[in-house]
Image (spheres, helix red, strand yellow):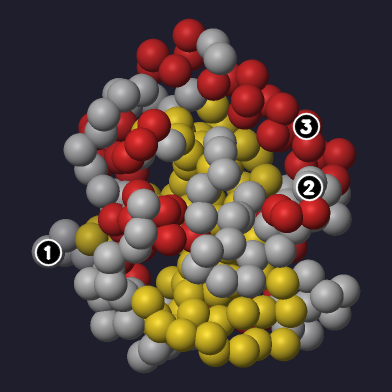
Amino acid sequence: MNLPSNLWFTAVIVLALQTSVLAAQNSAPSLKLSIGTPQSAVTASYGKPFGHWQLTASEYSAQVGVPTGLWMVYHLNAFGNRMYVTMLHFGHSMVGPQQSVSAAVDSLMLMPNGYWTVFQILNDQPEFGALCVTNCDVIRTTDSAGKVALLLKPETSKPDAAIIYFEGDSAGRIDRKSVASLQGVPQWVYVFRLSDFDSHHADLRKEVIGTWSPEIKPHQ
């Protein structure tokens, strides 16, 4: 795990939130982000990102399974004055009647700025509901080092389906290290392809502990 790089990135994000650069993006975007959203639509709704992150293969987030390369960094507000640093990665998708190639969101990462539970984050991010509209299995994962995290996977998923992965903060407080349930408090939230997740986590022990869908309203 490239901890110094992670800590450096977190410090840069926190500093950026305190600068006037935030004015470069819209404060109340109307677009609901989702996998497949065209980059042009993100730009039109959110404005310019307040930063960029060049993720390399040696960094921890890449080892989780998300794609490397350039990520666009946004600051998004939610209910109850909650805030998320939201990072978007754009891949290529086929769009339009002629099936022309266009850049579109293929992965997301969220970093909450406070003590928000998985329930609250799911409620704050409507795009997650689209992934679990026919129910997601709630899976508690444990790696070889004993670290516990939470995975939401569509019950009828295919290898290219998107999953939601909630991780704690390995370098932080004891109550933030693991995410064992929907009441847990994650430090990082990832949305990316199931096949990429599986290829990076062959040693995980998985236990289905329930289901979640957007019809089941989370508690605030």
- Say which amino acid is labelled 1: Pro
Marks 2 and 1, Cα distance to the nearest angstrom? 51 Å
- Say which amino acid is labelled 3: Trp
Residue 17 against residue 220 in the figure, above or below: above
Residue 36 pos. (x, y %) = 32, 59
Q: Is there a contact, CB below 8 Å, between mark 3 and mark 2?
A: no
Where is mark 1, residue-wise? 97
Instruction: Describe residue 195's horizontal placement relative to residue 104 as left or right.
Output: right
Residue 186 against residue 14 in the figure, above or below: below
Q: Which of label 1 and label 3 is nearer to you?
A: 3
- Neighbor class of circle 1 (other Cα within 10 Å; few <14, some 14-19, many 20+) is few
Q: Which of 17 and 67 lies nearest the eye of the viewer?
A: 17
Q: Describe the element under mark 2 as helix, strand or loop.
A: loop
Marks 1 and 3, Cα distance to the nearest angstrom? 44 Å
Residue 195 against residue 101 in the figure, above or below: below
Q: Is there a contact, CB below 8 Å, between mark 2 and mark 1?
A: no
Q: On the rendered image, what quadrant is the N terminus found in? A: bottom right
Residue under the image location 23 percent in, 61 percent down: 95
Instruction: Describe residue 88's horizontal placement relative to residue 197 as left or right.
Output: left
- Neighbor class of circle 2 (other Cα within 10 Å; few <14, some 14-19, many 20+) is few
Residue under the image location 25 percent in, 33 percent down: 29
- Say which amino acid is labelled 2: Arg
Residue 173, numbered label = 2
Q: Describe the element under mark 1 as helix, strand or loop.
A: loop
Q: Earlier in the sequence, mark 2 or mark 1?
A: 1
Q: Is residue 103 visible?
A: yes
Q: Residue 156: which quarter of the image?
A: bottom left
Residue 98 pos. (x, y %) = 16, 63
Marks 3 and 2, Cα distance to the nearest angstrom? 18 Å
- Neighbor class of circle 3 (other Cα within 10 Å; few <14, some 14-19, many 20+) is few
Where is mark 3, residue-wise? 8
Q: Which of 104 and 31 lies nearest the eye of the viewer?
A: 31
